[in-house]
Amino acid sequence: VGTTAWWKDAVFYQVYPASFQDSNGDGWGDIPGLISRIDYLHRLGVDVVWLSPMFESPQQDMGYDISDYQAVYSRYGTLEDVDQLIEVCHSRGMKLILDLVVNHTSDQHPWFKESRSSKTNPKRDWYIWKPPRYDSAGNRMPPTNWRGYFAGSTWTWDEKTEEYYLNLYGPFQPDLNWENAECRAAIYDVAMRFWLDRGVDGFRIDTVNKYSKRTDFPDAPITCPDVPHQPAPEMWCNGPRIHEFIHEMQTQVLGPYNAVSVGELSNTPLPEQVLPYVSAAARELDMVFEFSMIRLGTGNLFHGKYIYQPFPLSALKRHVETWQTFIEGTDGWHTVFCENHDNGRAVSRFGDDSTPELWEASAKTIALWQITSTGTLFLYQGQEIGMRNMPESWGIEEYKDVESLGFYNEVLETGDEKRIQATLHGLRILARDHSRIPFQWDDSPNAGFTEEGVTPWMRVHDQYRELNAAKQLDDPESVFSFYAKALRLRKEYRDIFAHGPFKLLEPENEALFIYIKESDARVSSSTTEDTDTKRKALVVMNFTKSVQECPDVSGALGCRKGEESLLMSTVRSGQLALETCDELKPWEGRVYLNF
Ligand code: TEU
């Protein structure tokens, strides 16, 4: 009922190929391994698989440094494996989207090899080259004082042609020059049409707001006087031509192929900045990831990102409220997510994994929060079984991520012991590595991720014998079973959960997270539309480890006492006696309906 695009109700699931399932015993996940697990995803209720980069790459940023957009990194498999994955997904009524990484290539990409070969090479202008500056003592300096995402300057000196090239990320990730129309045309052809022609259904678009930089390349204000390079996301985020470029990508490629698109929109904290990307009339993107909520706990995005900043529940609720409501009354759409490959695990960051009981309760309550939220729902591999951050006891040698190590090595050089310990503490909560340890399938050696006796590329969590999918699949009370059931209910009550307007209650309450979701008449199958009998849900979640008083449910729902019904509870069945509903157990979540 209600003509809404398929991707608004679809459940997306991000697979990080290196860590999902190894099929050939090299300790590295691969596409045949993923294919062997598609039925598991189908059973969970996944409609679309988002596969993080599996392209040819030197793997210095886990495949977000691509050296050939039309080849598959050998440890992941072959082009034929991808064709088979597309076939297997489509045969189950599922879809597949790939990761489109076109802000930069690897420095090993032929385009860059040509561009750096000489100042007159036809592809010189496909990347961003600038002559050096010199300080008063005649020392060579980068063109600007900008700091990149992995610590250090955004400029790398190239001896051969004696110029710097721009790299917002690692020196091995030179930025493509989107000002060059020939370069953009090649991106659309080589990185996009090639895969759409093979049957891929769309893209998650990496760093989607960074293609248009300030072309005057000014220095950034000095905000971190103790380091030579300054945070400057305003120099390359949401730049002067970004909407022109994204609109061009839509009209030239995404639209003609009817490809679904979800953009990664970091450093864009204002709704009025986000709406232009997702307004249907603008014909840019279908939806975006906005990062304010998931960034909670990180310090200053750049220099202090891994100095952990505790935050109150009210801060999380305010971000949720902003992003649950900003599309109301507009032709925009949004996404719901709390995990991905760039962040620590939700149950460790926003829940409580300090005891098995609190871990299970908070993992389920996080599931309730996600599943009752408006927008397209994205799950990250392992979230559905409550996978946790690496044990605190693990040392820095278990962290492989170029960003984690960039920040750690930078602080190590300062010799500031206090800051070093603070950075390690922050990494133990926030590092991108936590979401990249091998998927815990079962209690066999290496958690069933790879064969016994093989050393996986990252260490398997010590707790895999207790926390694994096999243990949960047939337990009706497990985190997995809760997700599967809740996903079905999200579909059944899509007018309320996936589409309905959000209203936060008790915003300053630092223990309870309570909101009302109403039915969106445009997609509702029920006929009663007058306001007081409009279908509504009340979501009540205890975000603490202590018992809390339950609010007045019928009052909040605006219905007569006893008319409300309990749709979902995170408490194991049999433990919840309705007559004691005036108390919420630690990390208990409930969803009531007013019908
Ligand atoms: O992330 C872009 C991005 O902004 C993140 O790098 C995030 O801001 C961060 O972790 C630094 O603060 C995308 C990919 O998701 C990430 O894995 C890649 O490392 C990055 O782009 C470069 O391609």
Image (cartoon, rainbow, N blue to C red):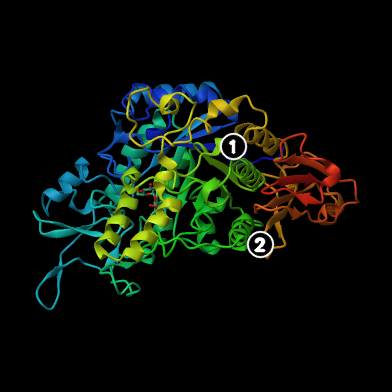
- Which residue does the numbered mark 2 point to in the structure image? 510
- Can the viewer see residue 168? no
- Which residue does the numbered mark 1 point to in the structure image? 10
Rendering coords of residue 485 (x, y %)? 67, 33
At 11% across and 53% down in the image, what residue appears?
Answer: 120
Which quadrant would residue 150 be assigned to in this image?
A: bottom left
- Residue furthest to the bottom in view is 136
Rendering coords of residue 109 (x, y %)? 22, 41
Q: Which residue is at the front of the view, 183 or 297?
A: 297
Q: Is residue 154 above or below residue 260?
A: below
In space, the residues marked 2 and 1 are separated at their CA atoms by 32 Å
Q: Is residue 250 above or below residue 128?
A: above
Mark 2 or 1: in front is 2
Specify whether tag 1 is near ligand 1 (CB below 8 Å): no
Rendering coords of residue 230 (x, y %)? 31, 68
At 45% across and 28% down in the image, what residue appears?
Answer: 447
Q: Which residue is at the front of the view, 468 or 4?
A: 468
At 42% across and 65% down in the image, what residue appears?
Answer: 300
